[in-house]
Image: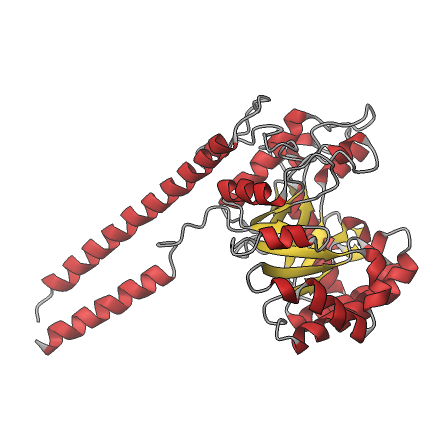
Amino acid sequence: MASFFSRISTFRIFLLCSLCFSDFGFLQGVSSLGINYGQLGNNLLPPEKVLDLLSSLRITKARIYDTNPQVLTAFANSGVEIMVTIENAMLGQLSNPQAAFQWVTSHIKPYVPATKITSIAVGNEVFTDDDTTVLLSNLVPAMVSIQGALAQLGLDQYIKLSTPCSLAVLQESYPPSAGSFKTEVSGVMSQLLQFLQTTKAPFWINAYPYFAYKGDPSSVSLDYVLFNPNQGMVDPFTKLHYDNMLYAQVDAAIYAMARLGFNGIEVKVSETGWPSNGDENEIGATLQNAAIYNRNLLRRQLQNEGTPLRPKLRLEVYVFALFNENMKPGPSSERNYGLFHPDGTMAYNVGLSSVSTTNSATTPSTTTSSVSDFTSSATKAATMEYNQSWVYWMLVFVLSFQVYMRRPF
């Protein structure tokens, strides 16, 4: 009898370990996907309706480009993880520890923990801003001051600081293993990376394969930048195969950090997207290309993929953007990155219903879809994944139990 109970205990341990290292019981969905919620529009949905939209899409991560109190209040108790942003112009002021403490006390502390603020983007594309010299001198001091303020308030273990960087900080990005930072930014970049390594925060990059295609459409393969089936490229030094440009750009950033002596920092994509419309000279900015890019990106996210260099570490991505924003300056494309129109209807159908069942991109529908259609597609895909996992582990349970029961005591 003692032998019997020993076997039962062993079996229970085996089953527990199996579940812990499986996906059973965890409806992952698109667990590494976030969305950029910009607000440069005079006709956008109110924050409460935006939260309803995100909830219907099962998107649980969002980035805003300020600390808008209306948004932070509306998102309270929603479970949505929020990345807030400090405007570039504030960096000089916040390099002062006392000013940083006052800022955190008034802009962050009143909303947590009800609003799940998990990240603060200290500036945006500071290394390539028009006022680079002044901003760079204040970047890391501001981050250190804000980190100190978070620590004083007991928030540093919940909120990470980083600063999204444009890929223009790279001197070389092709092949990925040649990735390196520009000499003129390497000094401050080393300080930033030291801060990120010390605080265990990620390195954020804004990566847009669209710009590479737009700049040289005769040499850059459209299929390669859209995640479509293609021959891809093999890095001649690492022999790693890349079938899309986004992953190659991420790995180039990883190699660039390694060249400065930093190897363990996670890279996350704070912005990526494709415009659905543009000016006459904005080659590739079409509804069809935008739908294909984002559909294929979502498919990769559903699979929780990593890059060729870090295949076991799923790549966290924030899609740009949630809405078309009619007040954004610049060329027409800047106002046409949204997955949705300002009223919450789809700009185009990214086809989540087909993401988990096909590997080939088809011509997207240009008709407007309702939010409920989008939701049901995502839910069906996730439910199928859950049901398959349930059946698999029930079989494991039954077979394992039979093996143990048939053995003599």
The image position of residue 102, as x and y in percent, is 75, 70
Q: Quadrant of residue 105?
A: bottom right
Q: Is residue 31 visible to the viewer in this orientation of the structure?
A: yes
Work out whether 392 lies above or below 325: below
Q: Is residue 138 left or right of residue 382?
A: right
Residue at horizontal 70 percent and vertical 44 percent from the top: 38
The image position of residue 331, as x and y in percent, is 82, 32
Q: Is residue 12 left or right of residue 91?
A: left
Work out whether 4 lies above or below 311: below
Residue at horizontal 74 percent and vertical 37 percent from the top: 41
The image position of residue 213, as x and y in percent, is 75, 34
371 and 356: which is toward the camera: 371
The image position of residue 185, as x and y in percent, is 85, 60
Q: How many marks?
A: 0
Q: Is residue 186 visible to the viewer in this orientation of the structure?
A: no
67 and 197: which is toward the camera: 67
Q: Quadrant of residue 255?
A: bottom right
Q: Quadrant of residue 127?
A: bottom right
Residue at horizontal 66 percent and vertical 28 percent from the top: 289
Quadrant containing the C terminus is bottom left
Quadrant containing the N terminus is bottom left
Q: Is residue 95 left or right of residue 46?
A: right
Work out whether 405 lies above or below 220: below
